């Protein structure tokens, strides 16, 4: 069984979070970004406490069966698979914002979906190595853009704007690491400071908000199809490097590809919970095929659906499952004593 380290999974998750955070948080005022990050941190902490006590290598399928029984576990796996495929369709459709001046739909979504599925079809370990490698390109480039973009920030633009409801979109994105519940069966090796990786993601979200809204202003940032891309037009690196738009488009496309690899890998595992006989390759390409079909459904859904769905399938279901398993294991230990 090909295993992967917690650090590799964290690197894949961070690379996956970069593009959706850049897309969403570039138009949201920084206080609501921080509020959304705080809400996601609470959900992840509630999951993390029992998850740390679960035996190494115990995957989502085993945990769901132990908590709810075989039939309910299959239903939960099927429902989670459908949501993960829908989330992959959303991620693929969001990728067109990386090319705001082109008519990129449906070519770019389908190409990135296929590219993300190629490593996922070889197993979660290949997807984690894929994301961990690309993290080394995504993180430094985003940091470079934000550092030099900060020169255009105007303090007057940083006064809090919008409403508390704006925190829902950043929180929905930052719940993504909770979907790692479906990839824990081959997780091995030394532990890693999960909180540090989440803080880095939260820092990225806040920095994108401050730089983009601070440079463009709240009104312009909200009306732009990709405020981060438009902000990059004014960046100059020591007066030598300018016109970063093509680099930004490539950077976001890479991150969306990592996101799709992660979602397809998680969907692959969820489908195997529902149909244990399904092979990894078949489950991965089946998830990608459903996501491709759902590309036309994504624009019809209201924004609140994504927040509620992520909270339910990536927050509530794994957290309750882990706590039920924790209680059952504690009960068994008491009986043995």
Image: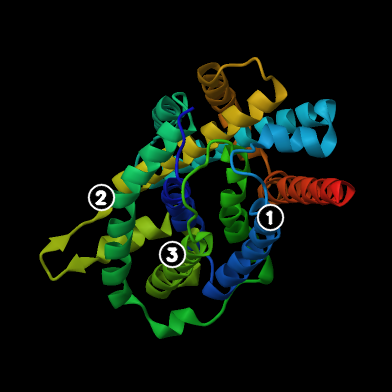
**In the picture shown, does residue 274 fall above or below 265?**
above
Q: Residue furthest left?
A: 240
Mark 3 element type = helix
Residue depicted at x 79% and y 36%: 66
Q: Residue furthest front?
A: 337
Q: CA distance from mark 3 to mark 1?
A: 22 Å
Give coordinates of residue 62: x percent, y percent: 71, 33
Q: Is residue 95 visible?
A: yes
Mark 1 element type = helix
Q: Which badge, 3 or 1, comes first in the chain's sequence?
A: 1
Q: Which badge, 3 or 2, comes first in the chain's sequence?
A: 3
Q: Which quadrant of the structure image shows residue 149?
A: bottom left
User: Which colouring convention does the figure follow?
Assistant: rainbow
Mark 2 element type = helix
Q: CA distance from mark 3 to mark 2?
A: 18 Å
Quickly name the residue at label 3.
Answer: 204
Residue depicted at x 10% and y 65%: 240
Give coordinates of residue 109: x percent, y percent: 45, 32
Q: Nearer the viewer, residue 157 or 120?
A: 120
Quickly name the residue at label 2.
Answer: 247
Q: Which badge, 1 or 2, comes first in the chain's sequence?
A: 1
Residue depicted at x 71% and y 24%: 274
Kindly check if marks 1 and 2 are in contact, taking CB atoms under 8 A apart as contact.
Answer: no
Q: Nearer the viewer, residue 154 or 135?
A: 135
**3 or 2: mark nearer the eye:** 3
Answer left or right for 76 relative to 272: right
**In the picture shown, does residue 187 fall above or below 116?**
below
Q: Please rate how many residues cluster around mark 2, counting C-alpha atoms within 10 Å: few if below 14, some from 14 to 19, many from 20.
A: some
**1 or 2: mark nearer the eye:** 1
Quickly name the residue at label 1.
Answer: 47
Answer left or right for 167 relative to 150: right
Q: CA distance from mark 1 to mark 2?
A: 37 Å
């Amino acid at each position: 069984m090909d295993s992967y380290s917690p650090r590799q999974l964290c690197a894949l998750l961070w690379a996956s979070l970069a593009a959706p955070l850049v897309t969403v948080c570039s138009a949201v005022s920084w206080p609501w970004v921080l509020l959304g990050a705080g809400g996601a941190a609470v959900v992840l902490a509630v999951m993390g406490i029992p998850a740390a006590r679960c035996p190494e290598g115990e995957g989502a399928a085993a945990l769901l069966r132990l908590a709810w029984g075989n039939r309910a576990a299959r239903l939960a796996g099927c429902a989670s698979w459908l949501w993960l495929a829908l989330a992959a369709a959303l991620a693929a459709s969001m990728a067109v914002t990386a090319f705001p001046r082109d008519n990129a739909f449906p070519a770019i979504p389908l190409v990135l979906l296929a590219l993300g599925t190629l490593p996922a079809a070889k197993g979660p370990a290949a997807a984690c190595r894929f994301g961990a490698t690309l993290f080394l390109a995504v993180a430094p480039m985003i940091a470079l853009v934000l550092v030099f973009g900060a020169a255009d920030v105007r303090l007057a633009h940083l006064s809090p704007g919008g409403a508390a409801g704006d925190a829902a979109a950043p929180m929905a994105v930052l719940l993504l690491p909770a979907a790692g519940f479906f990839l824990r069966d081959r997780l091995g090796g030394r532990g890693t400071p999960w909180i540090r990786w989440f803080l880095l993601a939260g820092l990225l979200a806040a920095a994108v908000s401050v730089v983009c809204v601070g440079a463009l202003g709240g009104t312009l940032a909200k009306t732009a199809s990709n405020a981060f891309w438009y902000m990059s037009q004014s960046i100059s690196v020591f007066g030598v490097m300018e016109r970063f738009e093509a680099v930004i488009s490539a950077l976001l496309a890479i991150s969306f590809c990592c996101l799709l690899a992660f979602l397809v890998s998680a969907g692959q595992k969820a489908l195997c919970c529902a149909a244990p006989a399904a092979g990894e390759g078949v489950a991965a390409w089946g998830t990608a095929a459903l996501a491709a079909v759902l590309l036309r459904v994504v624009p019809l859904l209201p924004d609140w659906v994504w927040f509620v769905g992520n909270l339910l399938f990536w927050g509530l279901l794994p957290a309750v499952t882990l706590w039920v398993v924790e209680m059952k294991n504690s009960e068994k230990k008491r009986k043995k004593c």
